[in-house]
Amino acid sequence: MAPPLFVGDVTLPLQFLDRKQSRTQSHAMLFFSYFKDLVGREVTVELKNDLAIRGTLISVDQYLNIKLENTRAVDQDNFPHMLSVRNCFIRGSVVRYVQLPPEGVDVDLLHDATRREARGG
Amino acid sequence: MGTLRSFDQFANAVLEGACERVIVGDLYCDIPLGLYVIRGENVVLIGELDLDKEELPSHMTRVSSTEIKRAQKAEREASDLKGTMRKRMEFLDMD
C-alpha cells in the first residue's frame, strides 16, 4: 500500500496508524539490509561487556544478531576464554558497536536512505 | 561450556554436560553444572569451540574449585580495596 499523502493536518487516524507502522518497520529494515550488504566482509563487533571480536560477517537477522567466522578477540590477553572460539553467534541486544571496513560505508547512500526515513516514505 | 542440544529464535538454549569456566589471573577451574536451560535474554554469545586448538594459553594452570574460590575472593577483596577510599581507610585503621 502506498503511504497516504500528508496534506496539512487533514489525516485520517487510521491512515496515520498505517503510516506510523510502515515507518517503524522500514526503520528496522534499513540497518538490517545495510548489514546484509556487508556479509562476507571483515568487521569488529564491540560488545557491551567491552569484549571486542574481529571476524568475517557470515549472517545477520532482523534483530541484528550476528554470526562471525574466523573470530579472534581483539584483546586476547584479557579474554583467554575466546582463544579456541573460531566462529560464533552474537545476540543483537549485547552489541555496542560494529566497526565496519571503510570501503563498506557508502555515506551518500546512507544519507539518502535516512532522509527518506525521516520523511516517512 | 557444554554440548548445545537445542536453541530457538530467542537464543534460549539447552546445554548438556555444562560447566562454568572460572578464570582468575593465570588460574582456571571448570565447575560442573549439569543440564542447563538458558533463557535467551541472558545470552551474550554462543561460540563453537575448535577442539583441535589449545583451549587456553599454556601458562595457565588448572586448579581445584576451592582454590579458584579462594583466588576469586582475594581478587574481589583487592578490587574492593582499590575501589573505595573508605575501605582503604578502614584497612589503615585496622593496622
Image (spheres, grey):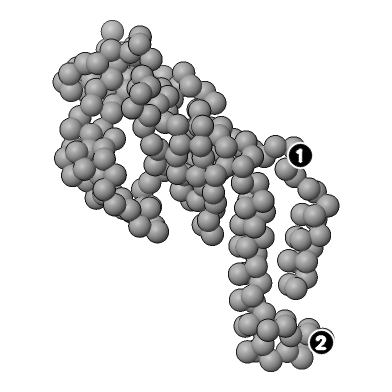
* Res A115 quadrant in image: bottom right
Say if mark 2 contacts mark 1, CB within 8 Å: no
Please identify the quadrant where the N terminus of chain A is shown.
Answer: bottom right
Relative to B49, residue B56 above or below: above
To which quarter of the image does residue B56 belong?
top left
Residue B74 in the image, given as x and y percentages of width and height: 28, 18
Q: Give residue B66's mark.
A: none
Q: Residue at x 76, y 61 (%)?
A: A113
Along the line of sight, the residue nearer the viewer: B22 or A109: A109
Along the line of sight, the residue nearer the viewer: A31 or B78: A31
Q: What label sits on residue A103 in the rendered view? A: 1
Residue A40 appears in the rendering:
yes
Question: Mark 1 is on which residue type?
Answer: Glu
The amino acid type, in three-letter code, at marker 2 is: Val
Q: Please state the chain letter of the residue tagged with numbered disc 2 in the rendered image.
A: A
Quadrant of the image for the C terminus of chain A? bottom right
Question: Vertical placement of A61 versus B70: above or below?
Answer: below
Residue plotted at (29% across, 52% down): B6
- Find numbered disc 2 in the image and state the secondary structure of the residue it sits on: loop
Q: How far across and down, in percent of the image, does residue B17 sit? A: 19, 38
Q: If you read the primary sequence from the N terminus, does the residue marked by circle 2 or circle 1 appear first?
A: 2
The CA span between labels 2 and 1 is 41 Å
Question: In the image, is residue A18 above or below residue A10?
Answer: above
- Mark 1 element type: helix
Residue that label 2 marks: A7
Decide if residue B80 is in sight here. no
